[in-house]
Image (spheres, rainbow, N blue to C red):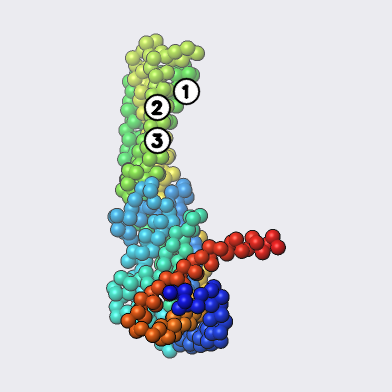
Amino acid sequence: MARIMTSGTDKDWFETLLASRWLIVRNMLLTGAVVVVLLWLLPHKYTAYTTFFPPEEPQGVSALELLTRAVPPEFRLGAERSPADLAVEILKSRAVCMPVLNSRIFDGRDSVAVYRLLGFRDAERAYSNVFKFAHFLPGKLGMVRIEVTTRWPAVSASLANAFVDQLDAVERIRRSEKAQQARQFYEEQLELTDKRVKKAAKALADFQRRYGIFQLDKQTTLLADEMARIRAEVLAKQIQLAVMSRTMLPANPAVVKLKAQIDELEKAYRDVEAKYVRGGSGGEANKGNLPALALEWGRLRRELKIQENLWELINQLYHQARIQEVKNTPTLQVLDRAVAPSRPSWPDKKRWLAVFVLLGGFFSVLYVFFEREFEALRRVERPDNRWQLFLLSLQEDLRRASHYLSQAPRRKRHTQRR
């Protein structure tokens, strides 16, 4: 029955569409015209972006991992966070966002606060909605990308650059404060080490005045000097570890690396000490062959060498911290400064126009299809069976459409053979 009602061949589909082609084309053109008008009336938004490399310490450790004041403690993580991820977290913090939102910008008539220009009553509300207009994206190659979207091209570019400048300012302050703390700590250690040097020198001088100067063999002297050098390096690195532990977690790769270096130096010290104490082949010194006074003189001399070497190492760290404290160079390597975009990023006119024109054509085809089915229903003599016949005819049409689509590859191959 459904075949009778739908007049039954696949050509009915094409004949119906062909007969209604101008209706479909007209509806698509009208839809396109309406969409063009709406797109012209909608407010446009412009996106500006800037990219940069996050700051790094001279030793290759991310400087952002050391930030203690501008970033909440939960962001100060160890090895699982890359410099780019940490830079993104700091960009989201109040230390960066609030100064940018409270800054003033010229809107063409007067200077106005950024949060008011963006349509917020206060900076706190703007900060809670910052991700509606600003996006901070870590890149695959370690870069960070900042995207800012507003209704004004110049404002978008200005805000994107402002986020970078504020991050750089926060990082400079952080580095200066960290260097100041390190300088003060090294200064205290220098004073303590200087006292130890004087104490060790006095003890050695008193011993020599009382018992005279002892002369050890060359091999023993070299081993003693090597022990003093290694021990001084161990003490200096332990002082560095104490400084780093103030701002870094134990899982931080820099802390782990420094601890490994200390372990290696202590192992080397034990090896040299074993040669010095037990003696061995190759003309090495033997403790049993040295007088007790000579051993004591060697111990005092070695202690003096340790403190002198330690003082030199701490003095180098102290001067490095002083230079870093007064250093005011940029901490970020900006690859692309944001510029005012010439084209809006929203709405995407071409995509919107294509989508709505296709939707207009799709609904026009549906309209033609249902109009044909209802026209067939109106010709039925028994009104009680109309809906049943409509459902049957709809099922038959869907079956034909599915069969036609499934036969499309076979028809294509047949056409190619011909």
Which amino acid, mark 3?
Ala
Q: Where is residue 159 in the image (x, y as percent from the top left)?
A: 43, 73
Which amino acid, mark 1?
Leu
The earlier-in-sequence mark between 3 and 1 is: 1
- From the viewer's perspective, is the residue at label 1 or at label 2 nearer? 2
C-alpha separation, residue under disc 3 versus residue under disc 2 = 11 Å
Q: Where is residue 40 in the image (x, y as percent from the top left)?
A: 49, 86
Q: What element carries label 1?
A: helix
The earlier-in-sequence mark between 3 and 2 is: 3
Q: Position of residue 264 (x, y in %)?
A: 41, 31
C-alpha separation, residue under disc 1 versus residue under disc 2 = 18 Å
The residue tagged 3 is 260
Question: Which residue is located at x 38 percent, y 32 percent?
Answer: 263
The residue tagged 2 is 267
| Above-or-below relation of 147 to 116 | above
Residue 408 seen in the figure: yes
Asked if the residue at tag 2 contacts the one at tag 3, i.e. Cβ–Cβ closer than 8 Å, the answer is no
Crowd class of label 2 (few under 14; some 14 to 19; many from 20; radius 10 Å):
few
The residue tagged 1 is 222
